[in-house]
DNA sequence: AAATTATATTGAATATAATTCATTAATACC
DNA sequence: GGTATTAATGAATTATATTCAATATAATTT
């Protein structure tokens, strides 16, 4: 895709991204103050970053424990269909408790991250959804005992 | 911790969380309109959710490809120190390119998610940081070829 | 159950911010 | 070097955030 390659971000864009990644609810006025620019100019920049899909979403990170979602698991899956965006991954991605679906190199084909209440609800999801997806040959589940760090923030260069 | 257990979220809180998780830059006025409440009341609620650490952060999800951060890897590590928040995990968590550090059940002790530009920069991080952490016995790295889904959004019940 | 206390919500007022758009400035392109 | 394109400013308007006293609601105590 040319559109992906063409994205050129200057110092100002990176600065905006850094501030917004840290606090998405920063006001446009505060952004303008930080960057020493007019608010209207910042607004233009931000809109463009959204349009270009550089900024994909503004989201609140919610404490999973507050919602009693204490089970986190990584599931490795072998599937018989070839590489690329297979049916299996698309079906997996539809499940709301599935937070990540990756196609990985090596023996196991897919890596799936799932967050649920407990092991019982994980089992329920695996039975009700995974078993309905054809081509899945085997799964290997790794349960997380404790999470020390969990964020998606990128390292954003100064320039 | 009692503070974690004591958190009680009502229908209104959950509704706020749902809207904010979907769009963290929603205006307080729009939140109020959606919930049929006064803006001042909503503001109170949101502040409390922040104080109680239910809302942990507002963040912009940035397209990694826009910053040429195209390498994603999961690294399984065996360490000689016992379970719990070991030194190794704390050191790993400090590395900005490290997005996740989990302590997992089973043979491998830690699961680490790392995002970098390319395999060369991953190697650089592993050499410069990982090797300096004592107690790491071995590592096994899984490279992601393609990501189909990646988000941290929780399934928030209606009530 | 009434009285008391604590908690949450409202509504109005004020301060601050978002947004628009015409003008000016800066850049890129022939 | 002149023209076209893109970006930034500043002022005006509209909308929003925030505060706070008053009121309502819920919880607790006796």
Image (cartoon, coloured by chain):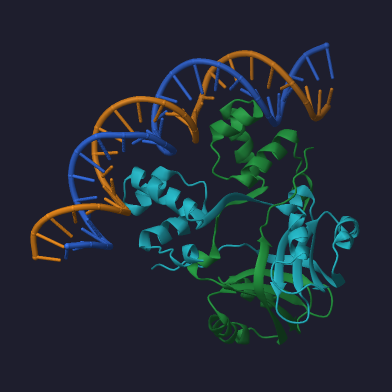
Chain colours: A green, B cyan, C orange, D blue
Tell me what residue is drawn at x 67 percent, y 57 percent. Answer: A152
Q: Quadrant of the C terminus of chain A?
A: top right
Image-based side of A147 in relation to C30, left or right: left
Tell me what residue is drawn at x 77 percent, y 59 percent. Answer: B91
Image-based side of C25 in relation to D15, left or right: right
Give the image location of residue A70, x and y in percent: 56, 72
Question: In the image shown, does B44 or B64 lie closer to the viewer?
Answer: B44
Give the image location of residue B106, x and y in percent: 74, 82
* Quarter of image, res A79: bottom right
Tell me what residue is drawn at x 48 percent, y 51 percent. Answer: B51
The image shows residue D16, relative to residue A62, as above or below, that is above
Q: Can residue B12 be seen in this view?
A: yes
The image shows residue B99, relative to residue A131, as above or below, that is above
* Quarter of image, res A143: bottom right
Q: Can residue B154 be seen in this view?
A: no
Image-based side of A57 in relation to C26, left or right: left
Give the tally of numbered discs: 0
Give the image location of residue D28, x and y in percent: 26, 62
Give the image location of residue B15, x and y in percent: 41, 59
The image shows residue A70, relative to residue D14, as above or below, that is below
Image-based side of D23 in relation to B124, left or right: left
The image shows residue B37, relative to residue A32, as above or below, that is below
């Amino acid at each position: 895709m040319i559109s992906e390659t063409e994205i050129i971000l200057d110092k100002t864009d990176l600065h905006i991204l850094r501030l917004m990644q840290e606090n998405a609810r920063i006001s446009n006025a505060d952004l303008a103050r930080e960057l020493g620019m007019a608010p209207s100019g910042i607004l233009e920049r931000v809109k463009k970053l959204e349009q270009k899909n550089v900024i994909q979403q503004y989201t609140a990170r919610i404490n999973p424990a507050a919602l009693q979602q204490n089970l986190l698991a990584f599931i490795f899956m072998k599937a018989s269909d070839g590489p690329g965006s297979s049916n299996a991954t698309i079906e997996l991605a539809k499940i709301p408790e599935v937070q990540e679906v990756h196609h990985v190199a090596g023996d196991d084909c897919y890596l799936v991250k799932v967050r649920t209440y407990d092991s019982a609800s994980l089992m329920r999801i695996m039975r009700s959804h995974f078993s309905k997806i054809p081509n899945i040959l085997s799964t290997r589940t790794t349960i997380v005992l404790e999470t020390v760090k969990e964020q998606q923030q990128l390292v954003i260069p100064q320039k």
